Image: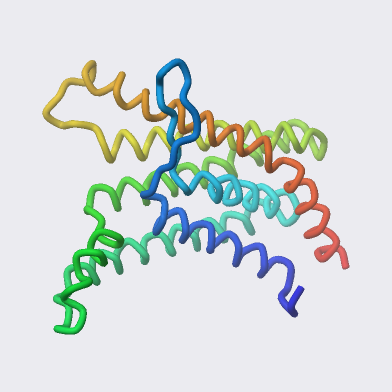
Amino acid sequence: MFGIEKLDLLIAVYMFSVAVSELMGGKTFPVANIMGFPLNASVAIFVLPIIFAIVDIITEALGKKRSQSVVRSGILVVFLILIYSLLTTHLAPSGRFKATEPSYQAIFSVSARIAASSLIAFAVSELMDIAIFTKLRQKLGTKGLWLRTNLSNFISEFFDSFVFIFLAFYALDKSLSSNFPFLIGLVLPYWFLKCVMSVVTTPFVYLGVRWLKEKAQG
């Protein structure tokens, strides 16, 4: 496709999705209203399943070490984006851009706590996804790809949501009993939406594995 090797194309889409989730994930939109409870989701909900699906595709087709290398590269990308955002938002604007500086700050400014929470959650969930997927493959063999990809995604996506929200929004001046209900109220709906999107992308995992294996065997 366009003279791009299949694996390179997958990695490009993976890095795009990682960058989008970091740079644009701060916006939420209404999804549904359940018994008077508004359910909102980050716009990153559309790319997060792609991130996990591509990791599963590469793990299934090319093995654990190859997918770990891609994930580590993604972690580096997240780290560099966050560090560079902190750098650029602390630089004084030139005269021509002083008027637009508040908008720039609103879009790209990020606190050190949010940055660290995002990086840790991404690293934990992505590496966990590979570990669980690989363990399931050892037990089930090549059968049940739908089960392996969704089960590994459900677990790792829960930890992605749990780790980020707890690290980013835990109120240090409040007790655990006060924090826990509020934070779980954020984690569970968002995790549920991620699970739904994981199921939706399952057919694409099958197609992606077949597509990538054709290249690996060619």
Residue 28 position, x and y percent, is 40, 43
Residue 203 position, x and y percent, is 76, 43
- Quarter of the image where one finds residue 159: top left
State which quarter of the image contains the N terminus: bottom right
Residue ID at (72%, 40%):
202
Front residue of 91 and 73? 91
Q: Is residue 10 left or right of residue 103?
A: right
State which quarter of the image contains the C terminus: bottom right
Q: Is residue 68 left or right of residue 137?
A: left
Q: Is residue 19 left or right of residue 9?
A: left
Q: Is residue 175 left or right of residue 189?
A: left
Picture layout, residue 99 above or below residue 58? below
Residue 106 position, x and y percent, is 25, 59
Front residue of 19 and 148? 19
Residue ID at (71%, 76%):
4
As drawn, the residue found furthest toward the right would be 218
Coloration of the structure image: rainbow
Picture layout, residue 210 above or below residue 135? below
Residue ID at (44%, 48%):
122
Picture layout, residue 53 above or below residue 181? below
Front residue of 60 and 90? 90
Residue ID at (16%, 76%):
98
- Quarter of the image where one finds residue 166: top left
Number of numbered callouts drawn: 0
- Quarter of the image where one finds residue 165: top left
As drawn, the residue found furthest toward the left would be 173
Residue 172 position, x and y percent, is 15, 31
Picture layout, residue 9 above or below residue 57? below
